[in-house]
Amino acid sequence: MNLKDKVEEGWKISAEGYSEFIKDELSNEQKEKWTSIILENAPKEGKLKILDVGTGPGFFSTILSLAGHDVVGIDASEDMIKCAIVNAKMAGATPEFVVMDSHDVTFPDESFDMIISRNVVWTLVNPKGVYKDWLRLLKKGGRVLVFDADWLADCRDESVKLQREKDREEYIKVYGEPKVSYKDAEKARGWRVELPLASEVRPNWDIKTMEELGYSSVKHRIISDRVYDEERLLLNRSVPMFMVQGDK
């Protein structure tokens, strides 16, 4: 099994468990927090055509559809898309969902005002190629917003690995075992050490790559305090969530 297949199998295994997390987010303050931070950083006002890459169980697609935008959510996992359809319907949202590989997006050039993703880029087997394709898909004046963290830092930095273990131990003392979306950890995430971004420091890599590809107004900021509750701030304090922006 090649790396791409391993990653897709990992998300298939995680679909139902991850969907439970998304259902919680759709019913609590996460919905408003994420809607606000995305639309605050949108390229323009008014109704937008948005591509949600790696939508998973449909969180971004659902909340932005509810906010009045025209949203297409794609994911390589059919199981994730099935969950996304159910979650959007339960929330009263009407985004479009399509089973589609993030590395092989078939929409025409200049189709979208904004492209968004959350916790997706770290899983890509060809992240530079995907960033390049997003430029093709953006309309002139369009914007990419990537929400992610350096989730693979512990693969290359022993100090980060040790700190993450300490954070987890402290978390367990306060909140108990962290919930995960899978049972078989090896199949679900064992491939992470093989990913190309396991050897890259982020978001430094993202910024450099976007600038090399021709994005304009490339910038980033840490947003953990905007989107995490106290539990997540503790569990992920050594790998803060960042937002990277790039324009066409």
Image: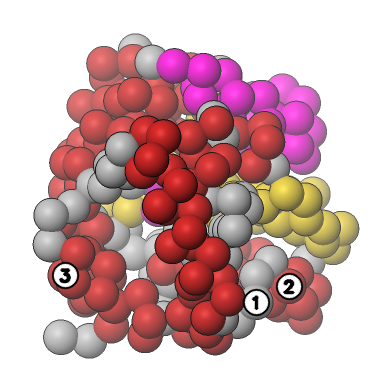
**Which quarter of the figure has residue 246?**
bottom right
Q: Residue at x 76, y 77 (%)?
A: 208
- State the residue position of label 2: 204
Can residue 85 be spotted in the picture? no
Q: Marks 3/2: CA distance?
A: 29 Å
Q: Secondary structure at mark 1?
A: loop
Horizontal side, residue 78 vs residue 167: left or right? left
Q: Which span is picked out in magenta?
A: 28-55
Q: Residue at x 37, y 33 (%)?
A: 175
Q: Position of residue 229 (x, y in %)?
A: 54, 30
Can residue 60 be spotted in the picture? yes
> Looking at numbered disc 3 in the image, what kind of residue is underneath it?
Lys
Q: Is residue 190 above or below residue 77?
A: below
Q: Nearer the viewer, residue 115 or 244?
A: 244
Asked if the stretch drawn in magenta spans residue 29, the answer is: yes
Horizontal side, residue 150 vs residue 206: left or right? left
Classify 10 Å Cα crowding around label 3: few (below 14), some (14-19), many (20 and above).
some
Q: Residue at x 27, y 68 (%)?
A: 189
* Label ID, residue 187: 3
> Looking at numbered disc 2 in the image, what kind of residue is underneath it?
Asn
Q: Position of residue 34 (x, y in %)?
A: 58, 30
Q: Position of residue 89 (x, y in %)?
A: 27, 19
Q: Nearer the viewer, residue 200 or 229?
A: 229
Q: Label 2 near label 1: C-beta < 8 Å?
A: yes
Q: Nearer the viewer, residue 221 or 213?
A: 221
